[in-house]
Image: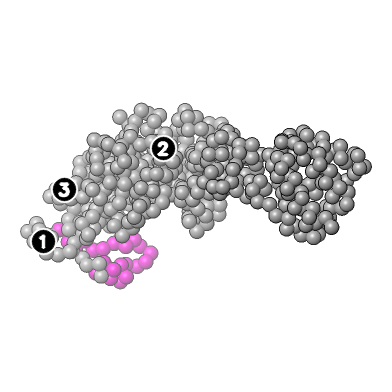
Amino acid sequence: MIRVRFAPSPTGYLHIGGLRTALYNFLYAKQNNGKLILRIEDTDRTRLVSGAVKNLISTLEWSGIEFDEGPHKEGKFAPYTQSKRLSIYKEHTNLLISNGNAYPCFYSQERLDTIKEKDIPSDIITKYDRRYRDLKTDEMLERMQEENHVIRLKIPSDGSIKINDQIRGDIDFDLSLIQDQIIIKSDGYPTYHLASVVDDHLMEISHVIRGVEWIPSLPKHSLLYQAFGWELPKFIHLPLLLNEDKSKLSKRQGDVAVEDYINSGYLKDALMNFVALLGWHGSDDKEFYSIDELLDNFSIDRVRSSGAVFNVQKLKWFNQYYIKNTTNPILLNLSKKYLPDDWDVTESMINLVKDSIETLSDIKSKLSIFFLYSTDINKNTIDQFFNDKIFTLLNEFIIEIDTKKSITSDDFKFIINTIKSNHSISSNVWKAIRITLTGNEIGPDLAKTVEILGPAKCINRIKLFLSDHAN
Ligand code: GLU
């Protein structure tokens, strides 16, 4: 049975790289009739952020990634939150101490800091002198009662270890570069290494799919599995996400929180499609994938090892594509949170602007022509586009539509062209009409805009405009 997990630390938001990890795990589980587990890794008490887990779960729910087990679900391996599993880690640590694979270390933090500063030339890896590694059992137990301590895993001081990553093949690690790893901190909480290995084993995880930044932890994890006498799961490390300048994707250069993308109005399908391609592509040049198509096409074999550039322009391009291909009622619904409550937005308004927006948050400014109007237009523009003939045309247009309840875009073009020819107006009048009706020089299709505004609003606006500018 394939069992995979997404194991975020609740740092306050879901990182875009985390969303990719969750997605690849989800696809892999679903393709193999396996199970996807959500596990909250909250053992770093210094980094706790209140509300983070709730936020994480709701963002994952938004993404459509479904978990089979997790803190928000039932499951036979519960609890799925590490801070609720402390007794399990303690029990396992005792096992390691009694089988001679782990030991308490009584160095104070000051002593460790001194070792770091004094003894070690900066060009070689920081290592401490393993003084407490071979204490006699009696002394060890007695001091454990009385002194502050951490628990360390014994790492062989030389030799190497080979571990397989399914994307990169076998990787060799030089053990002399690794210090005796802390597995229980002085606050009694396990470190990530211990907790994740114990949980991956107890939760029967078959494949560990996670970011490449965890490769350096592999030898520690592998030695922990050995110390417990457990079988290793398969490891798959996903490529690093990079900024455009090839540095590691960072908050400094743009948004990394999935919530920020949701809030700016990226559609779920666009974001998921984009994220799926951060490190994976299909066998052809296909770019657009629905979740169902990803389920058919995704394969771990085609995940590459080199970094994947996060190109926000490409994300915008995906978003535009998905917006264009979303039906008007759905788009109207999704847009509501970006629009003032008292704007009575219709599907035809959405239809008119949907091709010109990159994100849903653009929609408010695009639709403002229907709800906000001002005749405050600079004099140069008036001089450039308006003259007496245009004012005559506008007045006649009012007369023509005065008794109408509605006006189609074809009616509008016909009426204007008729007035033009009656008065032998050969100049381009459309820009002037647009400015009169919307207060803007640019905007969506004018005839359709007029159709949506309707005769009454058009007349009101023209009258206001003429009273301010035609004198
Ligand atoms: N808690 C780790 C993180 O937030 C998970 C690493 C792993 O998947 O093993 O990245």
Which mark sits nearer the N-terminus, 1 or 2? Answer: 2
**In the displayed structure, does residue 20 sit left or right of residue 189?**
right
Which sits in the foreground, 181 or 293?
Answer: 293
Which quadrant: the C terminus?
bottom right
Name the mark on residue 91: 3
Q: Where is residue 86 in the image (x, y as percent from the top left)?
A: 21, 50
Which sits in the foreground, 176 or 401?
Answer: 401
Magenta span: 111-134
Instruction: Please give the name of the residue rendered at 11% of the width and 64% of the height, measured from the top-left corner.
Output: 146
Asked if the stretch drawn in magenta spans residue 130, the answer is: yes
Q: Where is residue 281 in the image (x, y as percent from the top left)?
A: 51, 36
Instruction: Please give the name of the residue rendered at 11% of the width and 61% of the height, measured from the top-left corner.
Output: 145
Name the mark on residue 145: 1
Q: Which residue lies furthest to the front in this view?
A: 403
Q: Can residue 309 be seen in this view?
A: no
Distance, label 3 to label 2, CA atoms, is 33 Å
Q: Position of residue 446 (x, y in %)?
A: 74, 42
Which mark sits nearer the N-terminus, 3 or 2? Answer: 2
Name the mark on residue 65: 2
Density class for disc 2 (Cα within 10 Å; few <14, some 14-19, many ≥20) is some
Q: What element carries label 2?
A: loop
